[in-house]
Amino acid sequence: MRRFLVLSLLMLTAFFGAGPAAAITNGTADGNKHPNVGGLVNDTQYSDGTWLYCSGTLISPTVFLTAAHCGDEGHSVRVTFDPAYRDGDKTYTGTFHADRAYPGTSADSHDIAVVVLDRAVKGITPARLPAADSLSGLPSDQTFTSVGYGAYEVTNSPGGHQYLYDDVRMVATGTLNAINKTWLRISMNPSTGNGGTCYGDSGGPNFLGTTDIVAAITITGDAVCRSTNVDYRLDTPSARTFLRQYVALP
């Protein structure tokens, strides 16, 4: 599934002129700060011993928000909310539903999906969604809290870049870089103190500041996960049209 994720993200480079980004870099272990952030569990273990391939957020007791490129319509998937997943930890089974308009266009990729869980998640408070068009007037110094289970480090060796995973939920803070009608671009340049996302964080949340409001979900970014985190806004008409099929909107 991670190979499928990479291929899907690479197709987006034509839209953004950048490579894929989907794990938290220049961040720290999240612990239980964001218990409503989970990961999608692969059916088989990867060669590096890990299991997770995408991230997401619980937005109602039975609805898990993620990216459309993280799965196939109607397929059964598993979700974990453990801060450090190990094989055998508790998972929730559900059905994957993507926006029917995906993959859309460069203007609006419709790269959004949910997993409708077979049973309600108890003991975890769902994250909130933004109000309609509430992100259009953000200040230039607006910060975002990115959370996910993706690659925590990118190394450069003679064989090329290596992406390191450990199935641990990580968190980092980035600053607004640019915004348009459907996309947020968030700086994750470590030289300016920012952190951000990488492979495996796709579908994961970018919370508005330190709130529990998911402003946008991680979709792509630069190939070595050091420059820009590109995210799909959740306050737009297209995102809200999809989401209202599954949850009540603010």
Image (spheres, grey):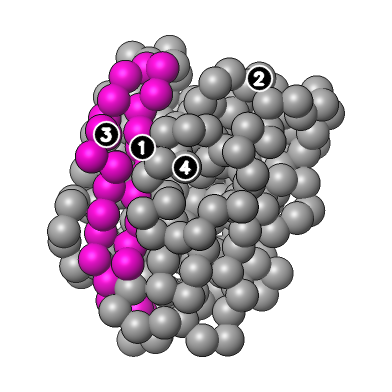
Disc 1/disc 3 C-alpha distance (Å) = 6 Å
Q: Is residue 149 magenta?
A: no
Q: Are marks 1 and 2 in contact (CB under 8 Å)?
A: no
Q: Residue at x 79, y 33 (%)?
A: 142
| Residue picked out by circle 4 | 240
Classed neighbour count for the residue bearing mark 1: other residues with Cα under 10 Å, few (<14), some (14–19), many (≥20):
many
Q: Residue at x 27, y 47 (%)?
A: 98
Count of labels in the image: 4
Disc 2 marks a residue whose amino acid type is Ala
Disc 2/disc 4 C-alpha distance (Å) = 21 Å
| Residue picked out by circle 1 | 111
Q: State which mark lies toward you, 3 or 2.
A: 3
> Relative to the observer, which residue lies in front, 209 or 1?
209
> Relative to the observer, which residue lies in front, 36 or 26?
36
Q: What is the magenta range?
A: 91-116
Q: Earlier in the sequence, mark 4 or mark 3?
A: 3
Q: Are marks 4 and 1 in contact (CB under 8 Å)?
A: no
Question: What kind of element bears circle 3?
Answer: loop
Q: State which mark lies toward you, 4 or 1.
A: 4
Q: Position of residue 156 (x, y in %)?
A: 49, 34
Disc 1/disc 2 C-alpha distance (Å) = 19 Å
Classed neighbour count for the residue bearing mark 3: other residues with Cα under 10 Å, few (<14), some (14–19), many (≥20):
some
Q: Earlier in the sequence, mark 3 or mark 2?
A: 3
Query: Residue 102 has which mark?
Result: 3
